[in-house]
């Protein structure tokens, strides 16, 4: 079944149902949202088509010059939207074992084109384990804070430092889960094929999205297992794709754009607080071997 068909079944096909849904969204935005949240409700109402686009409505730009030299990580690239209104939420993303920054860098311009600031990083050692990658992510967020304060930075005074998230692939995904467990002030964590065998995440209170694949010979089975250890009181999703390997989720173009669609909808909902995107998190993605969520 197509994405549009899923949404039609979920929301109903009638004009009246659609009108009621849109009205509820407008009421929530006008009455229930705080002034801070309202600042992040940008642009037209998202659709199944808009979230599957390779680029969002804003023009992304990247830079490396002038950034703080974070001691817990290596190379870095800051990605930001050039023509969206501030303030911006921000996320730091780290790659996996023996993998450079380039393995996950496509998340940068993708999310920036949707209004989210992204710092993609490399690691001090390609063999860094999940605890070191957790430290790298938290150090990268220090650089995000520094850019918000640096005179001459394109992001000076434009980042909402109360809206920070982390993401990572493979061992970087394990580091992501460690980070959200140990830093409850974070708004969201996105773990792509996370590797950290045997770890229990019973203290996570931060919303978490986990991608996994049944053909993943390196971290197969770990994502669904991690999901089960996270408390039911914590918003959480795990999407395990049938036949997917260890590398399918480190690019938002994966699964014909569905990886980006889920990652974007998750971060818009929990990092930015734009609940217009929450609707898409209830639709099971294609080729799902398993899909579990406690998000209503």
Image (tube, helix red, strand yellow):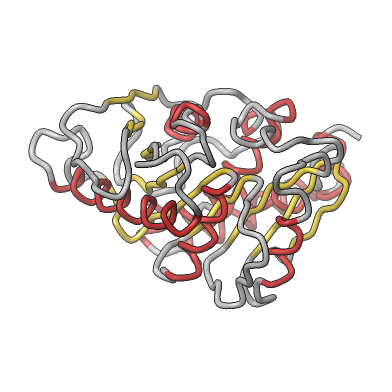
Foreground residue, 210 or 148?
210
Query: Above or below — where is 134 with respect to 264?
Result: below
Q: Is 152 or 251 nearer to us in this picture?
A: 251
Q: Nearer the viewer, residue 206 or 220?
A: 220
What's the residue at 22%, 38% (across, down)? 155
Task: Tell me where residue 45 appears, x and y as whole percent.
Answer: 58, 39
State the residue in front, 38 or 182.
182
Q: Is residue 140 left or right of residue 169?
A: left
Seen from this angle, which residue lies furthest right?
1
Q: State whether residue 48 appears in this view.
A: yes
Q: Residue at x 40, y 46 (%)?
A: 92
Residue at x 70%, y 38% (from the top left corner)? 246
Left or right side of 93 for 153: left
Q: Is residue 102 above or below residue 194?
A: above
Task: Specify whether residue 15 is in view.
Answer: no
Report whether 252 appears left or right of 124.
right
Residue 179: x percent and y percent? 46, 62
Image position of 292 (left or right of 70): right
Residue 27 versus residue 184 in the image, above or below: above
Query: In the picture, which quadrant includes the N terminus?
Result: top right
Residue 126 sits above or below residue 31 on the image: above
């Amino acid at each position: 079944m197509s994405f549009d068909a899923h949404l039609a079944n979920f929301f109903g096909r009638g004009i009246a149902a659609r009108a009621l849904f849109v009205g509820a969204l407008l009421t929530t935005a006008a009455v229930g949202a705080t002034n801070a949240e309202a600042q992040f409700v940008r642009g037209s109402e998202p659709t199944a088509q808009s979230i599957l686009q390779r680029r969002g409505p804003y023009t992304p730009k990247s830079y490396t010059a002038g950034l703080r030299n974070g001691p817990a990580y290596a190379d870095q690239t800051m990605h930001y939207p050039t023509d969206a209104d501030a303030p911006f939420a921000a996320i730091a993303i780290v790659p996996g074992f023996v993998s450079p920054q380039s393995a996950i860098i496509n998340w940068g311009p993708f999310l920036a084109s949707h209004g989210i600031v992204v710092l993609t990083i490399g690691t001090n050692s390609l063999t860094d384990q999940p605890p070191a990658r957790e430290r790298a992510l938290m150090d990268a967020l220090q650089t995000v804070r520094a850019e918000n304060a640096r005179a001459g930075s394109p992001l000076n005074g434009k980042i909402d430092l109360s809206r920070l998230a982390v993401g990572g692939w493979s061992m970087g995904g394990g580091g992501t889960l460690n980070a959200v467990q140990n830093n409850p002030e974070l708004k969201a964590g996105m773990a792509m094929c996370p590797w950290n065998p045997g770890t229990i995440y019973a203290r996570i209170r931060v919303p978490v999205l986990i991608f996994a694949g049944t053909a993943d010979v390196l971290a197969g089975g770990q994502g669904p297992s991690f999901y089960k250890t996270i408390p039911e009181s914590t918003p959480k999703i795990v999407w395990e794709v049938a036949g997917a390997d260890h590398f399918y989720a480190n690019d938002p173009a994966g699964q014909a754009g569905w990886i980006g669609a889920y990652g974007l909808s998750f971060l818009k909902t929990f990092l930015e607080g734009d609940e217009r995107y929450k609707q898409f998190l209830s639709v099971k993605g294609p080729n799902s071997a398993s899909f579990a969520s406690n998000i209503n």
